[in-house]
Amino acid sequence: MLEVAIHKRFDGFRLDATFTAEHELVVLFGPSGAGKSLTLQAIAGILPPDAGSIVIDGQTVYSSGQQIDLPPQARRIGYVPQHYALFPHLTTEKNIGFGLIDLSQRERKQRVSELVALFGLHGLEQRRPQGLSGGQQQRVALARALAMQPRLLLLDEPFAALDVNLRQALRQELAQVQARSGITVLMVTHDLNDAFAIGQRVIVYDAGQVIQQGTREDVFFRPATRRVAEFVGTRNILPAVVERNEGQTLWLRWQEHPLAALATSLKPGTPVYVCIRPTQVLLVPPERRDEKERENLFSGSIVSEQMLSETYILQLRLDQSEAAYDLEITLPGYVYHRLALERQKRVTIELRRQTLHVIPREDGKGR
Amino acid sequence: MARKLAFQESAKSRLISLPMVLLLIPIVLVSGFLTLPLIAIFLKVLPQEGLWETLHRPLVTEALRLSLVTSLSSLVLALLCGTPVAYLLARYRFSGAALLDTLIDLPMVLPPTVAGVALLMAFGRRGILGTWLNVVGFQISFTTVAVVLAQSFVSAPFYIRAARAGFQSVDQELERVAYTLGYSPLRTFLRVTVPLSLPALLGGAVMAWARALGEFGATIMFAGNLIGRTQTMPLAIYTAMESDLTAALVLSAILILVSFSVLLCVRLLLHRSPFGAYA
């Protein structure tokens, strides 16, 4: 288990990062310049915080209160910076074995060849980093960090320099590395797809502060604030007001329409945001409109559409609405074609209450 | 391959164009100006009689030995004291860094005779520090030690400057990664920083050594011109010019050959290194 609570002041910037992580793949997610990389450096021991504590599996490696500050050499943390920082004067083999200074020549050779096999680097042992592709460099950097069997692995934007296909492969590889070693892997990214694809736990950063942390589902489907909702690509953040709580139902008013959501403790009159991800907006075929158990039905027309390989992104304007559009909908190509949306632009949608996530509007104002 | 040849072809045809011909004139002038004096020395020295005997004259042998000993000593001194200073300047920002920087550059622009006078005022028999050293029985001025000091004073800045630039060109992220892999700062310096800045360090060392070998002004002011003790090759050449032209020419030819081959060696070394781009 990793427990981090660090504070550091810079010129015009304050870093206050507090979070915990189990032995899992953890993603530090947020825009560039939010303090994610600084957090990694502080944990690795190469950037001293002003105050706070860092505890890894029960061992305090930093504590301003107890005057503990282990040097990076004594922390046993694998650190892979952005662009990997491979030693340009050393071969793949020497790079991977670099941290194995306490082992005998034979043991070192043994361990290096294990890692070469593990990461599929056969035939590249004698190459220097400049002769390797981006994906190969990344594997060498991972192997180098894992060689000394760290108890924690820190990765700064590991996929930033790689193309999409390679990303997919290396995400899986990284998940396997975590599963095999069973250590905490902390990965910094500002890429939503990376975070979504492999983060078992997601820690959301904004302007030096941790603004939410939780399981991937928590963060993506139940963002705590409007800001987090924006970061995680919620797209539909609808300003509404609480009308009343009625048994299992929370009645809201969105634009002049009543909207049923799951009951909460919010008081009538509270301004809120209703979040729904574009993939969760249901399109209802006309003939099934009148089925029982339908709720939150709206009709409108598609005002713009965009095709991203197999996926369609539609913008929907409700009837009687004057906005450019009211909702964004993402749906797979086969649904688009089955509903004949290439001809039929008038549609009915359903917003299921389980998919609506209601957050109080902290500023109390509408959009 | 064919493409490369085509490129060379077109480069060749472009060389004959008028602007290129005009450009050729200064190239010929400059290279002629630089090589003619050097060739002249060899043209004059080779027909001289008794070259072999001249090589064995004490004036020549003593100057050779002394120059070798003192220039290498001052190089070692520059490496030992200059390396930490260069690293400090490259890696840390501290108050007084700019001042230290300027101080280090100063000997490079100072006339060597001024350096000699300054050294005399500091370490001479009646100098600020020299007075005290004299009391405890040390005398520096007009000894071989003074030669080494004079050479170090004027040559060390060449090494420090080059080393600082070399250290700065090494990505600090590499050093940090080495720390996380268990390397102490010293070990990191020796295994990461030094190998990666080696071309710059080598280049700086050679420049400093060459400057020490050629040192004249500061040496003659601070150390004097005593055969076997302070008369290095440049001083010996100066002395011999009045009485023994052959010796002067022989010593000059030796200095030219040594300088040329050292520069050539460094070029080749750097070219073979995979980090030639850093140099």
Image (spheres, rainbow, N blue to C red):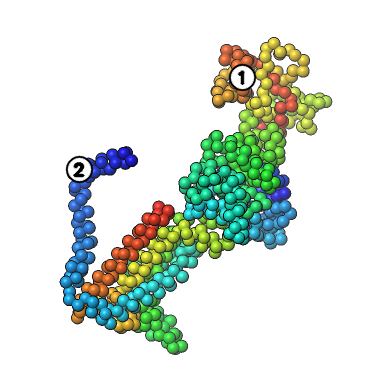
* Residue A281 can be seen in this image: yes
The image's mark for residue A334 is 1
Query: Which residue is at 58% across, 36% downward?
Result: A168
Of all chains, the one bearing label 1 is A
Query: Which residue is at 68% across, 53% downward?
Result: A54
Q: Secondary structure at mark 2?
A: loop
Q: Is residue B259 positioned above or below A240 on the image?
A: below
Residue type of the residue flagged with mark 1: Tyr
Q: Secondary structure at mark 1?
A: helix
Residue at the disc numbered 2: B17
Q: Is residue B267 left or right of residue A263?
A: left
Task: Give residue A286's position: percent from left, percent from top.
Answer: 68, 12
Q: Residues within 10 Å of mark 2 (few under 14, many from 20)?
A: few
Q: How many marks?
A: 2
Task: Give residue A128's position: percent from left, percent from top.
Answer: 48, 50
Callout 1 and callout 2 share a chain: no
Q: Is residue A130 left or right of residue A154?
A: left
Query: Which residue is at 66% across, 48% downward?
Result: A17
Q: What is the distance, in whole Å, between disc 1 and disc 2 at their CAs?
A: 66 Å
